[in-house]
């Protein structure tokens, strides 16, 4: 699908840009990206999805051209944003979230009936909690380079050689810096949120996906299991050969996988 429109949806003290591929009056899948990602990072996946009349990608607050996080930022506010967009679109059949976006989607599905929810490696507290002091220092200093360093090394556990390889890439590193602007507030919001008794309670069907490389491995595989334990009726799927960044490393494969789940 090609992008046809970008809708601006007013939300509390901010606004949300939603990229629409296809006919938004028909059955729609709504995608919610996570930390250090925006709608543009999910464009290749969005264009490859099949089975819906439209693909809508929510560009969460704090990402241009959406509005600012605001001082009241929290997971609850993110959920409120998602619910506003859900109600703005006429026929959302599937709600898809990645990482923090999956946690937001699953909280939204506690309050809004969703026919189908798909979550790719959702995360939840205490994810990244140990990195908060370093993220705080980088944020206070306005040091985006340090924010990326802390996020990659202390949150994701990325090896030093991989971090240095990314730093040497003149296209990738500046983009990571740009996307790291809200990471301290987001990580704090994840860890300040109270633990829910359940997730996706009003989703009629839930599919959870974990990358094969992360299954059972910290940090993403272990937090994935924490989330899955709160959704006893969820069906867990493994995406072979992939890790947390399947939308960048194998967008066509991920789009095909999600499309197949949507047809079942």
Image: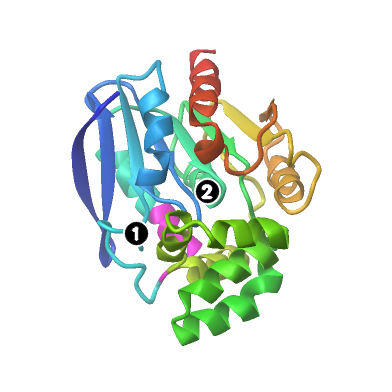
- Residue situated in front as seen by the camera: 104 or 230: 104
Q: Gap in Å between the C-alphas at discs 2 and 1?
A: 21 Å
Left or right of 28 on screen, residue 73: right
Position in image of residue 2 (x %, y %): 26, 27
Position in image of residue 221 (x %, y %): 74, 45
Sooner in the amino-acid sequence: mark 2 or mark 1: 1
Q: Tell me the element at label 1.
A: loop
Mark sitting on residue 107 = 2
Q: Tell me the element at label 2.
A: helix
Q: Is residue 195 something one can see in this rendering?
A: no
Position in image of residue 21 (x %, y %): 27, 30
- Residue situated in front as seen by the camera: 71 or 59: 59
Q: Are marks 2 and 1 in contact (CB under 8 Å)?
A: no
**Residue in the image at 48% along x and 86% along y:** 140
Q: Is residue 110 above or below residue 253?
A: below
**Residue in the image at 27% along x and 57% along y:** 66
Residue 108 highlighted magenta (yes or no) = no
Q: Is residue 172 above or below residue 49?
A: below
**Residue in the image at 20% along x and 43% along y:** 7
**Residue in the image at 36% along x and 27% along y:** 47
Q: Is residue 196 above or below residue 85?
A: below
For discs 2 and 1, the disc positioned in front in the rendered view: 1
Of the 4 image quadrants, the one containing the N terminus is top left
Q: Is residue 143 something one can see in this rendering?
A: yes
Left or right of 119 on screen, residue 172: left
| Most common SS among magenta residues | helix
Of the 4 image quadrants, the one containing the C terminus is top right
How many neighbours does mark 2 have within 10 angstroms: few (below 14), some (14-19), or many (20 or more)?
A: many
Range of magenta residues: 73-80
The residue indicated by pointer 1 is 63
Q: How many marks?
A: 2
């Amino acid at each position: 699908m090609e992008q046809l429109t970008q809708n601006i949806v007013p939300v509390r003290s901010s606004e949300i840009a939603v990229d629409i591929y296809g006919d938004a009056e028909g059955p729609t899948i709504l995608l919610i990206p996570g930390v250090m990602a925006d709608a543009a990072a999910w464009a290749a996946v969005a264009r490859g999805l099949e089975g819906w009349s439209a693909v809508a990608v929510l560009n969460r607050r704090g990402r241009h051209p959406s509005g600012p996080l605001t001082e009241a930022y929290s997971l609850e506010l993110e959920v409120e944003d998602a619910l506003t967009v859900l109600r703005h679109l006429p026929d959302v059949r599937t709600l898809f979230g990645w990482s923090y976006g999956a946690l937001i989607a699953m909280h939204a599905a506690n309050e809004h009936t969703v026919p189908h929810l798909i979550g790719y490696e959702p995360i939840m507290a205490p994810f990244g909690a140990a990195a908060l002091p370093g993220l705080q220092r980088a944020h206070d200093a306005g040091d985006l380079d340090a924010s990326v360093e802390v996020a990659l090394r202390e949150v994701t556990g990325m090896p030093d050689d991989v971090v240095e390889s990314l730093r040497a890439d003149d296209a990738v590193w500046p983009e990571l810096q740009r996307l790291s602007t809200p990471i301290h507030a987001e990580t704090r919001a994840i860890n300040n949120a109270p633990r829910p008794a359940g997730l996706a309670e009003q989703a009629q069907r839930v599919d959870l996906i974990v990358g094969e490389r992360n299954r059972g491995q910290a940090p993403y595989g272990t937090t994935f299991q924490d989330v899955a334990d709160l959704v006893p009726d969820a069906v867990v799927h493994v995406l072979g050969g992939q890790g947390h960044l399947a939308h960048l490393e194998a967008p066509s494969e991920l789009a095909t996988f999600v499309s197949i789940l949507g047809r079942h």
